[in-house]
Amino acid sequence: MCTSSTLWKVALTLVLLARPAVSQSSHKLRAIEINGHNGEAIVYHIDGKTFIELESLVRIGNGFISFQNDQIVLTLPPASDSANHHGSEAMKSNAGMSSEFMKAAVQDVAIIKDWTNVMAYAVQRGTPGDGARLQVFRDRATEGLRLAKVSVNSESDHSAHILLANLFDAVSGWTDKLVRERSSMDTGKYSMTENALSKDESYRKISTCTTFLGNMLPGGHFQDDSSCH
């Protein structure tokens, strides 16, 4: 699939070839402001028209670019100017998730999934222990949730972070429940009864939410699912 840089170079080449030899062109490094974000980029002037690379726009505007089949989707955060407060709120609600948040959230989902799998493996063999060995997973997931929170940059990020936090709480509560059952010698049902774990409502809900977030987050557009509530 072509990148935005490749598309720009191809477009520029076609323009140069299509124009007569007398066409006028120039380029210059210019200061650019996008929704209150400042930066510099090379601006091209060709036959009275102005061009700038998409990647430069995304970088300066702290935005996000994705490629869906033959379509380029460019998302820029709204301006922070209080005079445009209402318009900004509307833009935020429609904006996709930011790239930094997506990266942090996807990584935390992977950590939580590992935590769940290790717990499920242990309980099916009757060895969940006192939970001390699983503390490292809880700590890593907690830190991952924190990193996702500080990366929130849009309404979609905020909404997705709520679902991620709900998943963390569900796994944390499920882990504590299994440790308590182990203390009362009640975890044998998972190792002695076939498919007992798959019939556990908490585990099924956790698995469904984990799969949902694992598919939704990389897409960049927020969606909701009852399994994460």
Image (cartoon, grey):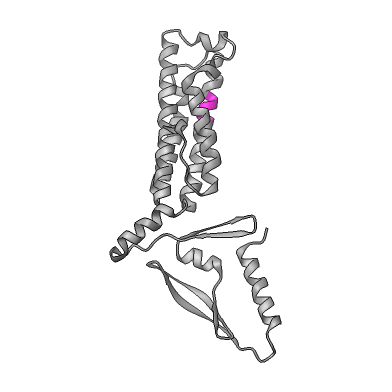
- Quadrant in which the N terminus is drawn: bottom right
- Quadrant in which the C terminus is drawn: top left
| Horizontal relation, residue 76 to residue 70: left or right | left
User: As drawn, which residue projects farthest toward the bottom?
Assistant: 22
Which secondary structure type mostly characterizes the magenta part of the structure?
A: helix
* Quarter assignment of residue 121: top right
Residue 115 part of the magenta segment? yes
- For the residue pair 73 and 65, the one nearer the viewer reads as 73
* Quarter assignment of residue 149: top left
Residue 151 visible in this rendered orientation of the protein = no
Specify the segment rendered in magenta.
114-118
User: As drawn, which residue projects farthest toward the left?
Assistant: 82
| Horizontal relation, residue 128 to residue 194: left or right | left
Residue 76 part of the magenta segment? no
Query: Where residue 83 sits: x, y (%)?
Result: 28, 66
Q: Residue at x 41, y 21 (%)?
A: 176
Image position of 192 with respect to 143: above or below: above
Query: Where residue 174 sits: x, y (%)?
Result: 44, 22
Q: Residue at x 44, y 22 (%)?
A: 175
Image position of 79 with respect to 50: above or below: above
Residue 207 visible in this rendered orientation of the protein = yes
Q: Residue at x 48, y 11 (%)?
A: 187
Q: Residue at x 51, y 23 (%)?
A: 119
Query: Where residue 103 sits: x, y (%)?
Result: 51, 47
Query: Where residue 226 sits: x, y (%)?
Result: 45, 32
